[in-house]
């Protein structure tokens, strides 16, 4: 009750502020979770239509109301509805408090930045270079051989940069690397930088440089492998963040290649690959494997060196604070900090915890010097520092244990500091199939073309910094502070429609959301779902207290987590959403072979025609994956969700999210599946995906394609086969795709035909509810009914939605989730408080007493039954309750 009163008071205050005259100053309170003084903070903030007309009229205040330096970027607008700002990125450095205020209005102006600024020089000539200057730090990147930083300068005395300030350089063509292994042995890569770009969001306090390049190999049978590195630099700071994206272009296994396409993703009918090839032993035999990948710098340190690193005592799941190990480093010493876990390749079957006990074996971490083990552990902190009497270098890799195997190494004899994204000490990463049995109606392997992004931090500093200070700095990125506005800000902006923030009111519905999300996070860290190419994803079916099949993001599970974050402000949901978005857009997708992009940054026109002569791209760029035992063995036409990727772009400033989403939209525009891609769930999902990409980019090409898709949906509704529903019976569970996509299209365009179509659809599903997938379809209609109610005011739509939602109520657990000790105990407890229907679903692989919508299942069906319905239902339940309360007050 207290939480509800606080929420109502906050919402009242918010409305009072936004309804002041357009010249008044409006204020949005901000909170930083896991606060750390000095940390760089980026957060996305949405605004209601018409509220903000320029990012120049926004500033950040500290807890005492004083303006602090900030950088504001307009991310997207409310066009074509109007020209007001829709999303911004706000950047600032944390001060001494976790509380801040974002102030905006026509009378507000942001002070100019004084002192150090980020300066980026980007010479895009053929033999050009890029340079980032933060004040104390200067980074140089050269086109051609290299692959990372050509040179790092640290100006300790701030008297200008000279040769004496060079602290690190890159080894020739090995600044970053992706080494492959096949039967002929290891083929080490050579890195070539091809292009550099200043990214959106760059400014005086925070600059972002994108480096595009490729790894080339000595043997002709190994394909060139594209890579992208994004460097985030900060004014006045000598640290920076790195996002390294590799692309696996190898041949994953040794099965005999057959010309043609699989039937479920065919773009033609003449050459179809047969699926009865189970007798080919090559499916389970690895071909091109990752022997090692990472980044490297040559350091310029001399004399007596010292290294230090963080580690944890206790078990791999222990949450106690880290400790510091420190030791001297002799000239020829080799120091290694390594982390691995159960079966690093994650080839099924993978050792895991039982329902009642955590896995005890498999997690191994070491701190070693030469052949001597200094510390044998289960978990290390993921960073290392090396320094002499003048200065030092730290490097850390985020999610060091979650994305095992990892390693950080210092080679004293060659003065090299390595950050291994895949440790060469582990078994090579193998992308063969685990079985030669078909999954998802196909027998294939689509590992070629997937990507993986890893986050690192580099910190260059003067000598004498204590370990606590170094750890605090690297943890700005390894264990980052997360800022957010009050959930009402996101809700009242309407960027995601009419949804309600989390509150204690109608807790019988909130519990179903909270318990489910916490159940999935519990399992992620219980099983655990770790590993470089697994972490971020959840499994989908829980049968006989055993998880089966990676979900591969169906249906936008990362977006569910992002929505839970904006509704609650809880950091744990942000971190889970971020990890899932990063995984889904990279691993659960196809990114290569890709046609080269022509930039026009050269003078000869011949360069354009030469670019057109490059090999053709795969038709399957950006089409996603289907749930399966491995991430890369099953595809389905247009089985991809961009909503969470774009949420990560808006909320965290992750450029990769927009990049991946545009790739999907470009493939939609090519219509490679003909009318098959323009019917059924493929059509409804494409409208939701395309409207999100169009909104993020305002690209008219996407809008033209989208308009035709919407027209088709409305034509099918008006035809003879769908009973005035927008959704055909075959795909009844996809109601939320249709209602979410068209609701947003209507919000942006005001198209009266779409408005009428949504109302007719609500009437159809009210009177003739879909039952083809039983409760998956039936409960998926709740959002459609609520949209119909919002547009028409027809009370029966709301009443029917409430009646159907009775199954979504959840009783209170007998004890807090934090007090539950095991997976088995939690699953039993959840089932005991669920009101979900007991009509059973005889799903393949399930017992007859299990339904795939049960509360102990994964998030796949939960999206259709709960996640895209409950937040919107709560909005209208609370609105109705408040209106009734107002009527009672007036009568009094």
Image: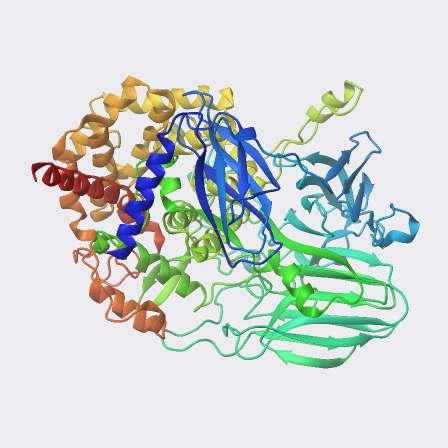
Which of 219/825 is in front? 825
Residue placed farthest to the left in the image? 891
710 w.r.t. 836: above or below: above
**Quarter-of-image position of residue 109:** top right
211 w.r.t. 696: above or below: below
Q: Is residue 210 left or right of residue 190?
A: left
Residue 38 visible? The answer is: yes
The C terminus - image quarter: top left
Q: Is residue 546 left or right of residue 208?
A: left
Q: Position of residue 293 (x, y in %)?
A: 70, 56
Q: Position of residue 437 (x, y in %)?
A: 44, 57
Residue at image position (58%, 79%) is 313
Q: Is residue 832 left or right of residue 249?
A: left
Residue 288 visible? The answer is: no
Which of 654/580 is in front? 654
589 w.r.t. 727: above or below: below
Q: Position of residue 133 (x, y in %)?
A: 77, 42
* Count of marks, rendered view: 0
Which of 890/685 is in front? 890
496 w.r.t. 811: above or below: above
**Quarter-of-image position of residue 705:** top left
Q: Position of residue 703 (x, y in %)?
A: 45, 22
């Amino acid at each position: 009750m207290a939480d509800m009163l606080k929420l109502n008071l906050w919402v009242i205050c918010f409305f009072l502020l936004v309804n002041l005259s357009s010249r008044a100053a409006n204020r949005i309170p901000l909170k930083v979770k896991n606060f750390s003084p000095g940390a760089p903070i980026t957060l996305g903030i949405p605004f209601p239509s018409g509220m903000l007309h320029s990012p120049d009229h926004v500033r950040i205040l500290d807890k005492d109301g004083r303006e602090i330096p900030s950088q504001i970027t307009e991310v997207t607008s409310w066009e074509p509805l109007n020209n007001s700002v829709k999303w911004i990125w706000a950047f600032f450095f944390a001060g001494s408090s976790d509380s801040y205020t974002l102030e905006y209005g026509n009378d507000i102006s942001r002070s100019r930045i004084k002192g150090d600024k980020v300066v980026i020089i980007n010479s895009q000539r053929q033999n050009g270079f890029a340079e980032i200057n933060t004040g104390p730090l200067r980074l140089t990147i050269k086109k051609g051989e290299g692959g990372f930083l050509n040179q790092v300068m640290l100006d300790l005395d701030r008297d200008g940069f000279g040769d004496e300030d060079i602290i690190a350089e890159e080894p020739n063509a090995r600044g970053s690397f992706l080494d492959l292994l096949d039967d002929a042995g290891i083929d080490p890569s050579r890195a070539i930088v091809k292009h550099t770009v200043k990214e959106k969001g760059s400014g005086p306090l925070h600059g972002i440089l994108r480096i595009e390049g490729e790894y080339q190999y000595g043997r002709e049978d190994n394909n060139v492998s594209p890579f992208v590195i994004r460097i985030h630099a900060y004014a006045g700071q000598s640290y920076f963040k790195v996002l390294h994206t590799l692309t696996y272009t190898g041949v994953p296994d040794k099965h005999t290649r057959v010309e043609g396409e699989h039937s479920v993703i065919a773009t033609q009918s003449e050459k179809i690959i047969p699926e009865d090839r189970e007798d080919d032993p090559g499916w389970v035999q690895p071909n091109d494997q990752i022997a090692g990948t990472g980044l490297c710098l040559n350091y310029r340190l001399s004399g007596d060196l010292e290294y230090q690193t963080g580690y944890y005592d206790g078990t791999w799941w222990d949450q106690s604070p880290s400790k510091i190990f420190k030791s001297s480093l002799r000239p020829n010493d080799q120091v290694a900090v390594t982390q691995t876990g159960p079966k690093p390749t994650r080839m099924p079957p993978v050792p895991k915890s039982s329902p009642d006990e955590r896995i005890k074996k498999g997690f191994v971490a070491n701190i070693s010097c030469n052949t001597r083990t200094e510390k044998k552990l289960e978990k290390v902190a993921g960073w290392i520092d090396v320094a002499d009497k003048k200065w030092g270098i730290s490097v850390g890799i985020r999610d060091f244990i979650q994305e095992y195997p990892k390693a950080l190494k210092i080679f004293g004899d060659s003065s090299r500091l390595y950050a291994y994204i895949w440790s060469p000490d582990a078994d090579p990463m193998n992308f063969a199939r685990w079985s030669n049995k078909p999954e998802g109606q196909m027998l294939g392997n689509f590992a070629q073309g997937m990507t993986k992004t890893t986050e690192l931090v580099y910190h260059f500093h003067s000598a004498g910094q204590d370990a606590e200070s170094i750890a605090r700095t690297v943890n700005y990125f390894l264990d980052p502070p997360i800022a957010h506005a009050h959930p009402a800000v996101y809700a009242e902006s309407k960027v995601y429609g009419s949804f309600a923030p989390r509150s204690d009111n109608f807790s019988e519905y909130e519990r179903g959301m909270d318990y489910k999300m916490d159940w999935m996070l519990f399992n992620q860290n219980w099983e655990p779902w770790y590993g470089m190419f697994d972490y971020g994803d959840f499994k989908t079916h829980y049968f006989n207290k055993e998880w089966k099949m990676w979900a591969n993001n169906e249906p936008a599970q990362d977006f569910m987590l992002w929505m839970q974050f904006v509704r609650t402000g809880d950091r744990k949901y942000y971190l889970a959403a971020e990890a899932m978005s990063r995984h889904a857009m990279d691993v659960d997708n196809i990114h290569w072979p890709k046609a080269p992009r022509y930039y026009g940054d050269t003078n000869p026109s011949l360069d354009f025609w030469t670019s057109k002569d490059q090999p053709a791209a795969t038709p399957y760029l950006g089409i996603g994956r289907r749930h399966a035992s491995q991430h890369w063995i099953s595809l389905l036409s247009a089985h991809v969700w961009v909503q969470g990727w774009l949420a990560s772009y808006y909320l965290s400033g992750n450029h990769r999210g927009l990049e991946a989403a545009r790739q999907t939209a470009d493939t939609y525009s090519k219509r490679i599946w003909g009318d098959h891609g323009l019917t059924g769930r493929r059509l409804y999902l494409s409208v939701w995906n395309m409207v999100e990409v169009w909104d993020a980019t305002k690209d008219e090409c996407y809008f033209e394609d989208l308009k035709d898709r919407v027209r088709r949906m409305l034509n099918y509704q008006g035809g003879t086969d769908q009973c005035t529903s927008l959704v055909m019976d075959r795909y009844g569970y996809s109601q939320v795709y249709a209602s979410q996509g068209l609701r947003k299209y209507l919000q942006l365009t005001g198209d009266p035909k779409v408005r009428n179509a949504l109302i007719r659809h609500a009437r159809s599903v009210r009177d003739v509810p879909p039952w083809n997938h039983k409760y998956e379809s039936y409960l998926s209609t709740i959002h459609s009914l609520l949209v119909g109610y919002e547009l028409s005011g027809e009370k029966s739509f709301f009443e029917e939605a409430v009646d159907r939602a009775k199954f979504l109520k959840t009783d209170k657990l007998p004890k807090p989730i934090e007090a539950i000790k095991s997976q088995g105990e939690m699953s039993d407890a959840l089932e005991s408080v669920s009101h979900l229907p007991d009509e059973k679903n005889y799903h393949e692989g399930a017992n007859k007493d299990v339904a795939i919508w049960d509360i102990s299942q994964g998030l796949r069906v939960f999206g259709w039954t709960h996640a895209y319905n409950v937040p919107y239902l709560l909005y209208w339940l609370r609105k109705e309750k408040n209106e009734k309360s107002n009527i009672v007050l007036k009568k009094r």
